[in-house]
Image (tube, rainbow, N blue to C red):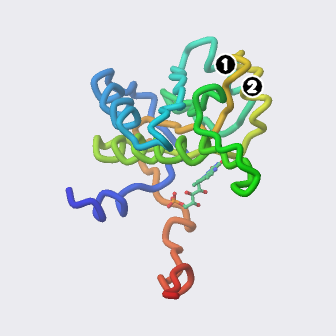
Amino acid sequence: MAFLDLARERFSVRSFAPTPVEEDKLALILEAGRIAPTAANKQPQRIFVVRAGSEAMDRLCSATRMIYDAPIALVVCWDTEAVWHNKRETWHHYTSGDMDCSIVATHMMLQATELGLGTLWVRGFNARNIHEALELGDTIEVSCIIDVGYAAEGCTTSPHHEIRFDLEHSVSTL
Ligand SMILES: Cc1cc2nc3c(=O)[nH]c(=O)nc-3n(C[C@H](O)[C@H](O)[C@H](O)COP(=O)(O)O)c2cc1C
């Protein structure tokens, strides 16, 4: 599939079928995240796979309403001891963790789309609550969650999906 067709096919899924995600598909999704570029190639991403029916999923769902019964939630985090961090004052202590994780998450999301799976990018949560619920380590920061699963029958795009501003809104030539 051409890349733009794939990107257009993806939409936020907020209603998942109970059908499990095949392990070989999950492996491809994780591989897509593994090969993503990261600042200075530090590869600080730490992906926590949470499966429906597990105790971890119960704890995750107690910390956020945004899982929508997805069979898998990929909790995308970074390790503060591995991330690229520029301490120069003039660079405003720039840390790449969220950017790295966003690229990793995008790779995984689009790979899932290509495999016929639905996804939801989730950031509407209190990261501290997620951290505590999953008992993540001291050096782990939560960036986002990607819900993954087969879209429930009849699941369609939300009105937001149809709304994209023209290029003139976001692109300027200087
Ligand atoms: C950084 C980010 C955070 C988001 N957080 C949430 C969320 O917490 N809950 C949710 O239902 N959707 C969330 N979304 C999905 C957006 O609402 C959605 O991508 C947008 O409305 C466009 O719709 P579409 O994905 O169907 O094209 C998030 C998307 C992004 C990129």
| Residue nearer the viewer, 143 or 55 | 143
| Image position of 1 (left or right of 28) | left
Q: Is the residue 172 above or below the residue 106 in the image?
A: below
Quadrant of the rendered image containing residue 46: top right
Where's residue 154, x and y in %?
A: 43, 50
* Residue closer to the observer: 132 or 45: 45
Q: What is the CA distance from the residue labelled 2 to the residue labelled 1? A: 6 Å
**Left or right placement of residue 17 versus residue 50 in this view:** left
Query: Where is residue 99 drawn, in percent x and y?
Result: 57, 48
Q: Is residue 11 left or right of residue 110?
A: right
Provide the residue designation for mark 2: 62
**Residue 28: where, in percent of width, then height?**
30, 31
Three-letter residue code for mark 2: Ser
Three-letter residue code for mark 1: Asp
Q: Residue furthest top?
A: 55
| Quadrant including the N terminus | bottom left
Q: Quadrant of ligand 1?
A: bottom right
The numbered dot on residue 33 is: none
Q: Which residue reaches farthest left?
A: 1
Contact check, label 2 and label 1, Cβ < 8 Å: yes
Question: Residue 58 got which mark?
Answer: 1
Residue 97 sits in quarter: top right
Secondary structure of residue under mark 2: helix
Which residue shows up at 35% across the image and 36% down it? 35
